[in-house]
């Protein structure tokens, strides 16, 4: 099928595949849009224009186009579209889905400086070490009864680290055991991953009511809002009593830091960082941090099972570095170079957020095409990580390919446009350091303490994907864990 030429005021819009009446290109996307969009890009080029119902969207599918959008013309591509769902779930005043402007700038500054800076990430080191040790204990216990449901244990680890970083001691909120709260988080991820059809195709809005999406959104919002209100009220109560978390050398959590910032800003005049904004930002941390971290861990373990030589090499590296210690702590991680290669290769092949969402702030140009203001942008980082012109044997899991990289962490900072799991530019992920600290520590622990295999003599994990806010393995990862001891 041929690309249709299109023009806007004499300037060329990007090429566009033929679509359907009213629905536009929506029916072409399927349940894994990053894959469908790669196929479309193969015929229509690295910058193409789609219509999602009534909404125009430009898809960016090459490193060159991504560099131009996220670096050269970053300010013009730095907004996001707030869907009705994000508006509803995040009080219309969060940071991650905020349009480019003053509110986003202030909230981002607080996140980058006070919540997710290198120093802050380091301050949560004990939380990560305790949760990693607890995970090892849970695997050991579960392994006595046969194959371990590793997916469940990993999601529980990722949630616990993020919730403890956000709330501090959360034993009184019943968050430890998963159960009800886990269900609320699952619903939240599902709601954000699904999007509302009515927004793209207004005459189909009734479908959202019929499928129960609207009711689920209300239920989920009320449950999370109630929890956040309670946590903030308890923090305020403690502060009124003259007791601040951290006064005794203990951990200062996100809510405390945000309340501090709130008070500081107040004294300088002008209340802009109110309770609702605090709730919205904490929600962003949960949504941005939990499933992405979990998905990275799950993909890494699945790839290692499918690549036993790489698994063995990594275990040898870890066991040689740790030697006589019982537990791996963060000091050990600096010695684990191959671990970093494995994680980087995992994120190249399986970026948890395969389509980075942006919106143009103003009229812009991209590879010579005109992109009008307020056009949705989807950067297909999954496709960019597999570009055959950049990556030799692009489909293969080869951690070695990064062995000679001079600056291993460039991709975490969004400075390598061939590898963009964390996006790039002014909207790039501020949580990359937080996430990688959690991922490295847990992988090192799991591979140090256990030898892993598939149950029933199977040799390969099925790598089918499950779409959603973060793309994860479709099938739950059940593995046999054989405890390893150094003697
Ligand atoms: C492996 C784990 C993670 C991956 C792959 C990931 C990926 C991403 C990506 C692709 C973006 C969009 C970047 C862009 O527009 O250029 C993003 C934004 C964001 N991420 Fe992450 N992320 C991860 C972990 C985290 C963690 C742990 C947190 C916080 C605790 C976090 C918080 C955020 C926030 C707040 C934004 C919005 C930034 C803005 O709009 O200014 N992320 N992330």
Image (tube, rainbow, N blue to C red):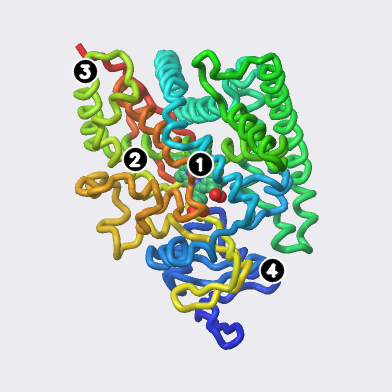
- The residue that appears at 79% across and 49% down in the rendered structure is 209
Q: Position of residue 33 (x, y in %)?
A: 53, 57
Q: Earlier in the sequence, mark 1 or mark 4?
A: 4
Q: Position of residue 70 (x, y in %)?
A: 46, 61
Checking the image for residue 54, the label placed there is 4
Dividing the image into 4 quarters, which one contains the C terminus? top left
Compared to 404, does 204 lie above or below?
below
Query: Quick check: marks 3 and 1 in contact, CB under 8 Å?
Result: no
Q: In the rendered image, which residue does mark 3 sit on?
A: 323
Tag 4 secondary structure: loop
Which quadrant of the structure image shows residue 198? Answer: bottom right
Q: In the rendered image, which residue does mark 1 sit on?
A: 112
Q: CA distance from mark 1 to mark 4?
A: 35 Å
Compared to 99, does 330 lie above or below?
above
Q: CA distance from mark 4 to mark 3?
A: 60 Å
Looking at the picture, tell me which residue is in the foreground, 107 or 386: 107
Q: Position of residue 477 (x, y in %)?
A: 44, 33
Dot in front, 3 or 1:
1
Looking at the picture, tell me which residue is in the foreground, 392 or 317: 317
Query: Quick check: marks 4 and 2 in contact, CB under 8 Å?
Result: no
Q: Earlier in the sequence, mark 2 or mark 3?
A: 3
Q: Earlier in the sequence, mark 3 or mark 1?
A: 1
Q: CA distance from mark 2 to mark 1?
A: 23 Å
The residue positioned farthest toward the bottom in the image shown: 10
Q: Is residue 211 left or right of residue 311?
A: right
Compared to 312, does 67 lie above or below?
below
Give the class, few, some or many, for how many residues have Cα within 10 Å of label 3's Cα (few <14, many ≥20). few
Q: In the rendered image, which residue does mark 2 sit on?
A: 343
Q: Is residue 242 left or right of residue 437?
A: right
- The residue that appears at 50% across and 27% down in the rendered structure is 161
Q: Earlier in the sequence, mark 4 or mark 3?
A: 4
Tag 1 secondary structure: helix
């Amino acid at each position: 099928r041929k690309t249709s030429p299109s023009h806007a005021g004499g300037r060329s819009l990007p090429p566009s595949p033929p679509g359907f009446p009213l629905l536009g290109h929506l029916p072409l996307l399927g349940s894994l849009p990053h894959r469908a969009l790669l196929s479309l890009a193969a015929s229509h080029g690295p910058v193409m224009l789609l219509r999602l119902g009534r909404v125009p969207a430009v898809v960016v599918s090459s490193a060159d186009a991504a560099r131009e959008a996220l670096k050269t013309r970053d300010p013009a591509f730095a907004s996001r579209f707030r869907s009705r769902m994000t508006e509803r779930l995040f009080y219309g005043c969060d940071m991650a889905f905020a349009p480019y402007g003053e509110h986003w700038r202030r909230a981002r500054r607080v996140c980058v400086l006070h919540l997710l800076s290198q120093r802050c990430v380091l301050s949560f080191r004990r939380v990560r070490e305790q949760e990693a040790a607890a995970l090892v204990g849970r695997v050991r216990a579960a392994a006595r009864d046969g194959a371990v449901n590793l997916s469940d244990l990993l999601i529980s680890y990722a949630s616990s680290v993020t919730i403890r970083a956000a709330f501090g001691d959360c034993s009184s909120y019943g968050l430890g055991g998963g159960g009800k709260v886990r269900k609320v988080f699952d619903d939240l991820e599902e709601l954000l991953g699904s999007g509302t059809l009515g927004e793209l195709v207004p005459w189909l809005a009734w479908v959202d009511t019929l499928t129960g999406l609207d009711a689920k959104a209300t239920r989920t919002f009320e449950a999370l809002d109630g929890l956040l209100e309670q946590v903030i009220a308890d923090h305020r109560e403690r502060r009124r009593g003259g007791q601040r978390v951290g006064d005794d050398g203990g951990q200062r959590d996100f809510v405390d830091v945000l309340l501090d910032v709130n008070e500081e800003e107040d004294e300088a005049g002008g209340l802009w960082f109110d309770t609702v904004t605090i709730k919205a930002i904490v929600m962003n941390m949960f949504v941005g941090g939990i499933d992405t971290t979990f998905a990275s861990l799950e993909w890494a373990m699945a790839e290692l099972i499918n690549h036993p030589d790489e698994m063995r090499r990594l275990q040898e590296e870890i066991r040689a570095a740790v030697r006589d210690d019982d537990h791996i702590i963060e000091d050990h991680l600096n010695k684990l170079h191959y671990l970093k290669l494995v994680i980087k290769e995992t994120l190249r092949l399986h970026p948890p957020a395969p389509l980075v969402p942006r919106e143009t702030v103003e009229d812009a140009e991209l590879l010579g095409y005109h992109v009008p203001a307020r056009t949705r942008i989807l950067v297909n980082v999954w496709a960019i990580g597999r570009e055959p012109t950049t990556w030799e044997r692009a489909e293969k899991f080869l951690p070695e390919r990064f062995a000679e990289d001079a600056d291993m962490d460039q991709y975490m900072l969004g400075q390598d446009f061939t590898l963009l799991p964390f996006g790039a530019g002014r909207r790039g992920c501020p949580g990359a350091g937080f996430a990688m600290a959690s991922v490295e520590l847990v992988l090192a622990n799991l591979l140090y303490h256990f030898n892993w295999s598939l149950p029933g003599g199977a040799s390969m994990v099925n790598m089918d994907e499950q779409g959603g806010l973060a793309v994860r393995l479709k099938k739950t990862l059940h593995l046999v864990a054989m405890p390893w001891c150094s003697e």
